[in-house]
Amino acid sequence: MAALTVMGLRLEVIGSTMEEMAIQHIVTDVNVKEDIPLNSAITVTDDLTVNIDMYIETEIPFTANIPVSEEMLVPIRMGVKDYIELDTLIWVTEPITILVDDTIPLDQKMKVTLFGKDKGPSFPIKSKIPLKQSLLIDFAGPLPVKSTIPIDMLIIDTLPIGIEMSIPVDVMVPVKIPIKQAARISFTGPMPVDAMIPIEMNIPVDIPLEETSLAFYFRKLAKGLKGLTSMSLDDVLKTEETKEK
């Protein structure tokens, strides 16, 4: 009887413990390490700061008038065939020896000298005097020259030619512009996202056993343990029915 009484008390304690277990919470940390597929459209409300490091290749229209001022050496080869009218004065500073071969006509009156005086009678003289000798002539003043000189010559030379002009330019100039700066980007609409998002985190879990199906069995087990040492007529009938089956 003493043992039965002690057993009943111990079963009562165990039953109470089982009832307390039915209202306890399971608190633990669950480590989650998994890739979650994401295929959705998200709305970004804040502006994002993006660092830009890139090159832009484009073409820029360029229109201008470029002045050109240069001197060029141009080879010249040309023939000159023309007549030059010459009308000028020439200074002859040195005496010139001239060969004279001509006839001087003589038609004049001459007086006969009598007694050393030119008081004699005059008589006409008409003749031609041949002249052939060298004469030394000195010019006291400029000598007028007027003539037409024919020119037939070939000119081969290199002449400096100055070029003053403006060259119009209208071209597309290719450029490569480096861009290294920070820019703020805003999104006016939802942005589609299709990616695998890796997740690794510790999630604290608090499971109240009272809200699970285990609470029913804990309470039922506690009730059974508490009434394990008592016996009723219903229990005897149930025991007999179980044996017959």
Image (tube, helix red, strand yellow):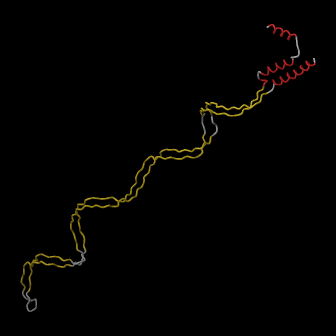
Left or right, 83 with respect to 13, comes to left
Above or below, 35 against 47 in this view is above
Q: Nearer the viewer, residue 151 or 198?
A: 198
In x, y percent, where is residue 40? Answer: 61, 30
In x, y percent, where is residue 198? Answer: 64, 34
Query: What is the quadrant of the N terminus in the image?
Result: top right
Quadrant of the image occupied by residue 27: top right
Above or below, 201 against 89 in this view is above
In x, y percent, where is residue 18? Answer: 83, 23
Above or below, 136 against 215 in this view is below
Q: Nearer the viewer, residue 11 or 36?
A: 11
Quadrant of the image occupied by residue 45: top right
Residue at 85%, 19% in the rendered image: 225
Query: What is the quadrant of the C terminus in the image?
Result: top right
Left or right, 36 with respect to 235, comes to left
Residue at 18%, 77% in the rendered image: 97
Quadrant of the image occupied by residue 223: top right
In x, y percent, where is residue 166? Answer: 40, 54
Residue at 42%, 50% in the rendered image: 169
Residue at 22%, 71% in the rendered image: 145
Furthest residue toward top: 244
